[in-house]
Amino acid sequence: VAITGKPMDEHQRIAHYLAPLTQGEAGAYGLQNDAAAMHVPPHHQLIITSDGITAGIHLPDAATAEQLVRKLVRRNISDLAAMGAQPWRYSLNLHLTGDESPDWWDQLAATLANEQARYGMVLLGGDCSSGARAAHMSMTCYGLCNAAPLLRSNAQPGERLYLTGTIGDAALYLHTQASAFAHAYYAPEPPVHFAQSLRGIASSCIDISDGLGADAAHIAQASNCRISIAQDALPLSASAQTYRNAQPNENADFWPHILGGGDDYQLLFSAAATHADTLAAHAARHGIRLTDIGVVEAGNGVRVVNAAGDAIPLTRTGYRHA
Amino acid sequence: VAITGKPMDEHQRIAHYLAPLTQGEAGAYGLQNDAAAMHVPPHHQLIITSDGITAGIHLPDAATAEQLVRKLVRRNISDLAAMGAQPWRYSLNLHLTGDESPDWWDQLAATLANEQARYGMVLLGGDCSSGARAAHMSMTCYGLCNAAPLLRSNAQPGERLYLTGTIGDAALYLHTQASAFAHAYYAPEPPVHFAQSLRGIASSCIDISDGLGADAAHIAQASNCRISIAQDALPLSASAQTYRNAQPNENADFWPHILGGGDDYQLLFSAAATHADTLAAHAARHGIRLTDIGVVEAGNGVRVVNAAGDAIPLTRTGYRHA
C-alpha cells in the first residue's frame, strides 16, 4: 500500500495496520478475501468468545487505543481461560468515529501486535467502519481445547473453592482513581496458561468479570449448590491491604468493593480437596498465586462469612455500564 | 426469565429474545456461559466471515430491526457463498442505543429466527451493550467446507465469466427510491446453495458487494489476469430494463449504476468453457439465473465493452459510507 500525504481509506488502513498482524497465516488470505478459513486440528474443539468495548462506556472517554485494545483482548482471553482453552486466532470488528489519527492507528496496531504475541494468537479477519459516536471495537477470540472444556455447572458439595491472583483492585481503581490500582483495571492478567492445567481437575470454573459475589452466584446456580466464601481468606494486593487499613469502617468502605466490584478477570473454580497438592504445583509452575477461599455446600446461592462467623450481605458496585 | 412491567436488562433480553435462537445447540450453553464450543466435523474447514451494519451508515436512519437484521445476515451469507461454504453457525454483537422498544426487540428476534431457518444456521454466542448513537450490529458467520474453498485468485485466460441473478437493482434503489427496486436493496438473496455446487468447477469467485466493476477488478488483481465484460450481456431485471428504456441517455444515466453500484450480493465467477453444461444444470436445479457475461484474458484490470465494441469507463456509484 502506497502511503501518501492523504488520509488512508479503510482498505489502505486494513492493508497497512492490520494485514501484518495475520503473520502470514494462510487462512487469513492477507485480509483481502471475503472470508477466512480455519483448519481446526483433529480431536480439538473450537472455543469461541466475543466481547466488545466502547470508549465512554466500558472505559473512560479519554481511553487511549492501547488501553482499549488491551482491555478488549484481556476480557476475551479471560473467557477462554474460564473454559481452559488455549488462545489461537482472533478477528476484529472496528466501528470507529473516523477521526482517529495516524498515531492512534499506530498505537492500535502496536498494541494488537504485543497482545497477540503475549497470548499466541494471530489475526484472521474482521471489518472496519466509521461514523460511530465513540470508538467501539468487538473481538471474537478462538481457542483450542483437546479435552472437555471447563464449565460452571459441575461444582459438587464438599469441594474446595479457589481464587487466582488477588481480588478487588480494579474496583478500587474505579472508586479511588489511585494509580496503584490502575494496572489491575487497564491491564488485567487472566491466568490463561494456568487455566489449561485445570482441565480434568476443576469441576467448575468462571472468570471474575461481574464481581466475586455475582460470579460465584453463577456457579451456584449452574451447579445447583451453595458457594460459601470466607471473607478473611480473600487474597488482597498490598495496595488493597493498605487501603483497607486506612478505612475507619471497612465493612462499609472496603468489602463492598472487593466482593461486589468487577473487572478482576481472575478465575474462581472448585476442585476436590484431594487435588490440593497438584493445584499448588501447577500454580507454582505458572507463577500464579492461588488461594483456598471457601467450600461448595449443598443448597443454593452464595454465602460470605466474616471472621466473626457472621454472614454479610452482597451488593454490586463498580462502573455500571448501561 | 420473568417478564415484568419493568424494562428488561441485558441479561434478561439475552435470555428472552436470543437464547431461543440457539435451538438447544449444546455448544451455545444457552448463551449463559462465558464462551461457546464448536465441534467442527472431521475433514471440514471452518469458513469465517464477519461484517457489521449501522443504521444511518449502511442503511437509512429509519431502517427497521427487520431491515437491519436481514441485510446484515445476507451480507455475511454472501461472503460464505463467495467461498462455496455452507452456513452453519453465527454469533451476534449488538451495540445499541438502549432506547429500543419491546416491539423492536420482538422484530429483531423474529427476523433472526426467519433468517437462521432460511440459511440453516443457529446462534452460538455474542454480546450486547448500549450507549451507541445508532444501532450497530456485527455478526460473525461460520460456514463449513469439505473441499477447497472458492477463492478469487485462480481465474485463467480463456475461461468464461458468469454472473448469477440480475445486477444493478440495489444501486437503482439508492438512485431512485422506487419501490420496484427496494427488495433487491433490503433483502438481497445471495445464491449460497448454488455456490456450493461451484466447488471444483469455478476457478475464481467473488460476491458483488462493492460493485460489478470493482469486484471484477478484485478477481483480475488476485488472479493476475484481465476480466473482459460484455455490457449488453449483463442480466437486468424487468424493472431495470424499464428504467433503462426511459432514460434519454443510458450511457450517462443508467450504465454507471449497473456497473458501479454495489449491494447486489450476486456471484461473479470464472470457469472453463467445458463446464458450461454442468453449470447450467446446477443453476436450473437451484432456480438460479446464470449468465455468461464475458471472458478471462491475459493482461490485467477490467474492460467493459458495449454493443458497438467500444471500451467504456468504469466509475463507482451508490451509497458511499465513510
Image (cartoon, coloured by chain):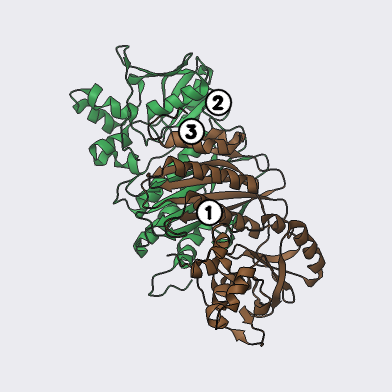
Chain colours: A green, B brown
Mark 1 or 3, closer to the camera: 1
Q: CA distance from mark 1 to mark 2?
A: 42 Å
Q: Give percent across and percent down for residue B157.
A: 72, 76
Q: Is residue A281 above or below residue B266?
A: above
> Label 2 marks which chain's residue?
A
Q: CA distance from mark 3 to mark 2?
A: 16 Å
Do circles 1 and 2 both sit on a common chain? Answer: no
At label 2, the amino acid type is Ile
Residue count near mark 1 (Cα–Cα under 10 Å), binned few <14, some 14–19, many ≥20: many
Residue A285: give its label: 3
Q: Which residue is mark 2?
A: A201
Q: Which residue is mark 1?
A: B72
Residue count near mark 2 (Cα–Cα under 10 Å), binned few <14, some 14–19, many ≥20: some
Can residue B291 be seen from the camera position used here?
Answer: yes
Q: Give percent across and percent down for residue A272.
A: 52, 19
Q: Give percent across and percent down for residue A268.
A: 44, 28
The local secondary structure at tag 1 comes to helix
In the displayed structure image, the side of residue B222 where residue A206 appears, left or right:
left
Q: Quadrant of residue B278?
A: bottom right
In the displayed structure image, the side of residue B261 where residue A68 appears, left or right:
left
